[in-house]
Image (spheres, helix red, strand yellow):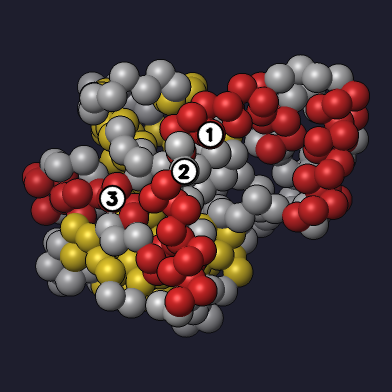
Amino acid sequence: MSLNERLAVLPQFLLPKQALTAFAGLVAQWRGGAMTTTIIRWFVGRYGVDMAEAANSNLESYATFNDFFTRALAPGVRPLAPAALVCPVDGAISQFGAITGERIFQAKGHDYTATALVGGDAALAALFRDGHFATLYLSPKDYHRIHMPCAGRLQRMIHVPGALYSVNPTTARGVPGLFARNERVVCAFEAADGTPFVLVLVGATIVGSMATVWHGVVNPPRPGRQREWDYADQDIRLGQGEEMGRFLLGSTVVLLFPGGPGAPLRFNPAWTPGGAVRMGQAMADRA
């Protein structure tokens, strides 16, 4: 990591991240009329947001910044590839590949454990020992709804409190165990054939909240303790490509899949760290 990158990451350890995030959440929910529209126009210009893909391209029609940020896409702009697993988000590939034992690669010199990522549940993490992972970063310009990589039945959801570091590539190279330190929402599913998989929605600085389609907004509240919901006795099923959640000011998704002889996985050969991805593109097939 270069000196410039170290200096860029240093403020992450000093800034009042919780207070900044709470303030950003209030601003994002503010119904400010013309002022809200001005903020949205600035954001679109600053980050190059492609509103031609939005179901509603009229910036003045969004009552709040969150309404704009979580905008729906126009029908047909993200067709699903014929693959076992499709990419669940628009964004960039941070890292992907094999889980070594239970260690997940973050960046050169940094990794973290699956147990830490899922909030300390060793039994859940053990399902993905020597399995596969993908870490996908959503930048400010991206579409911020999260979709299902394959059809699944919801089993559990865990809200893990934590820090709120930025999750951009520079910070990922400079903060050890970043994705297992930040606040996150762990969503455990079972595929149609019984194969478990997990989507972890990772919070970050300025991420006002995260929401799922079955629960609504998960955070706030932020009670400072881990919370869990058990859905095993309910029949909540989502099809491949269906929306499962969204970031109210974006972040990162980490996906976990099992390995072993019964669940070999072959990632899209076109994938490379840093490469751009779109929701619905082929992510992986069974080997």
Q: State which tag comes first along the sequence, 1 or 2.
A: 2
- On screen, 177 above or below 61? below
Of circles 1 and 2, the one toward us is: 2
Amino acid marked by disc 1: Leu
CA neighbours of label 2 inside 10 A, class few (<14), some (14 to 19), many (20+): few
Amino acid marked by disc 2: Leu
Q: State which tag comes first along the sequence, 1 or 3.
A: 1
Pointer 3: what residue?
A: 180
Residue 107 in the image: x percent, y percent? 35, 72
Mark on residue 15? 2
Q: Is residue 47 visible?
A: yes
- Callout 1–callout 3 Cβ contact below 8 Å: no
Amino acid marked by disc 3: Ala
Which of the pair 156/178 is nearer the observer? Answer: 178
Pointer 1: what residue?
A: 20
Which of the pair 52/21 is nearer the observer? Answer: 21
- Callout 2–callout 3 Cβ contact below 8 Å: no
- On screen, 93 above or below 71? below
Q: Helix, strand, or loop for circle 3?
A: helix
Residue shown at 46%/43% (left/top)? 15
- On screen, 153 above or below 11? above
Mark 1 to mark 3 CA distance (whole Å): 21 Å
